Image (tube, rainbow, N blue to C red):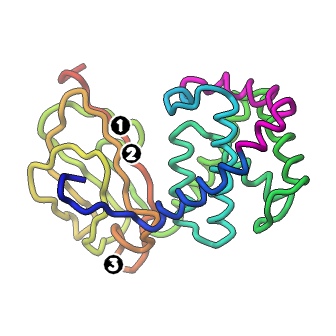
């Protein structure tokens, strides 16, 4: 926030932080008390993701494990209360930070004690087993979980409004520097509302809808070497933003692309 501007505390983010931090006084001592059982698998998993963990200031395996367990508890909390918007947002953020396994960990605890139960001996056994399995072959387990999550997202995105094309490409697109366009093509006439957030290129003209409301065009200037991550729609506001005239919604997704350092590179 700028100087003099009142801070805001989005309710879902404040709730996520509360659930997260409330668990640390319980999780951290438990991990320390069971280090001998947890260390073999967790340390091997840590070695696989060490660069990501250190970038997030988690400099050793037990720090990673503390964070893994509290993040899994946040996911369990939202699932148990049917709050799937915050669940999906937290899962996206956890995976972006390198915690590829937290959803699978939440599943393992739920399978042991039930979706709304606390943490008892059955949950402890499930956590011991989980990190032993993930530590046995971390690269393969992460790849399998990435594939599972990608399949889940494909199923979600098959519902409602369909995005037929994006320019730059939706995932890992590359574009030349200079003036250009952000372009989204949908499978039906849209209602005219837009929810496009994140690190966008400089907008240099008025966004417009073309082809009877099926195509959104945003004139922009692409800065050489730029990297952009945009969010289409917001998990916390289902039904808002990109929505067809028929009332159907575009399931949220990321739009990632980069700009070449020099034209033609």
Frontmost residue, 22 versus 189: 22
Query: How many C-alpha atoms fall within 10 Å of the one at disc 2: few (<14), some, or many (≥20)?
Result: some
Q: Which residue is mark 3?
A: 245
In the rendered image, the vertical position of residue 92 relative to residue 250, given as above or below: above
Residue 41 — which label?
none
Q: Which residue is mark 1?
A: 173
The total of numbered circles placed on residues is 3
Residue contact between numbered discs 2 and 1, judged by CB atoms under 8 Å:
yes
* Left or right of 18 in this view: 123: right
In the rendered image, the vertical position of residue 115 relative to residue 46, given as above or below: below
Report helix, strand or loop for mark 1. strand
* Spot occupied by residue 248 in the image (x, y as percentages of width and height): 43, 75
Give the prevailing secondary structure in the magenta stretch: helix
Report helix, strand or loop for mark 2. loop
Considering only order in the chain, which callout, 3 or 2, is on the residue closer to the N terminus? 2
Q: Which residues are magenta?
A: 28-51
Q: Which residue is mark 2?
A: 170
């Amino acid at each position: 926030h700028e100087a003099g501007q009142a801070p805001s505390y989005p309710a879902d983010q404040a709730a996520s932080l509360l659930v997260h931090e409330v668990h640390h006084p319980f999780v951290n001592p438990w991990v320390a008390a069971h280090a001998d059982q947890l260390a073999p698998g967790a340390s091997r998993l840590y070695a696989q993701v060490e660069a990501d963990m250190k970038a997030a200031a988690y400099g050793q395996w037990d720090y990673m494990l503390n964070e893994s367990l509290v993040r899994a508890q946040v996911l369990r909390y939202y699932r148990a209360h049917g709050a799937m918007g915050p669940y999906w947002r937290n899962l996206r953020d956890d995976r972006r930070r390198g915690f590829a396994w937290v959803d699978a960990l939440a599943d393992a605890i739920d399978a042991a004690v039930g979706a709304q139960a606390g943490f008892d001996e059955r949950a402890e056994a499930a956590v011991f087993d989980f990190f032993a399995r993930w530590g046995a072959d971390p690269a393969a387990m992460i790849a399998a979980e990435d594939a599972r999550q990608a399949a889940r997202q494909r199923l979600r995105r098959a519902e409602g409004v369909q995005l037929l094309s994006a320019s730059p490409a939706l995932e890992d697109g590359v574009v030349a520097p200079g003036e250009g366009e952000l372009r989204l093509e949908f499978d039906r006439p849209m209602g005219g509302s837009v929810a496009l957030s994140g690190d966008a290129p400089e907008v240099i003209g008025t966004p417009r809808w073309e082809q009877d409301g099926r195509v959104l065009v945003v004139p922009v200037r692409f800065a050489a070497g730029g990297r952009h991550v945009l969010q289409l729609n917001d998990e916390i506001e289902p039904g808002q933003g990109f929505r067809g005239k028929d009332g159907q919604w575009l399931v949220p997704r990321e739009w990632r692309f980069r700009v070449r350092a020099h034209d033609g590179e």
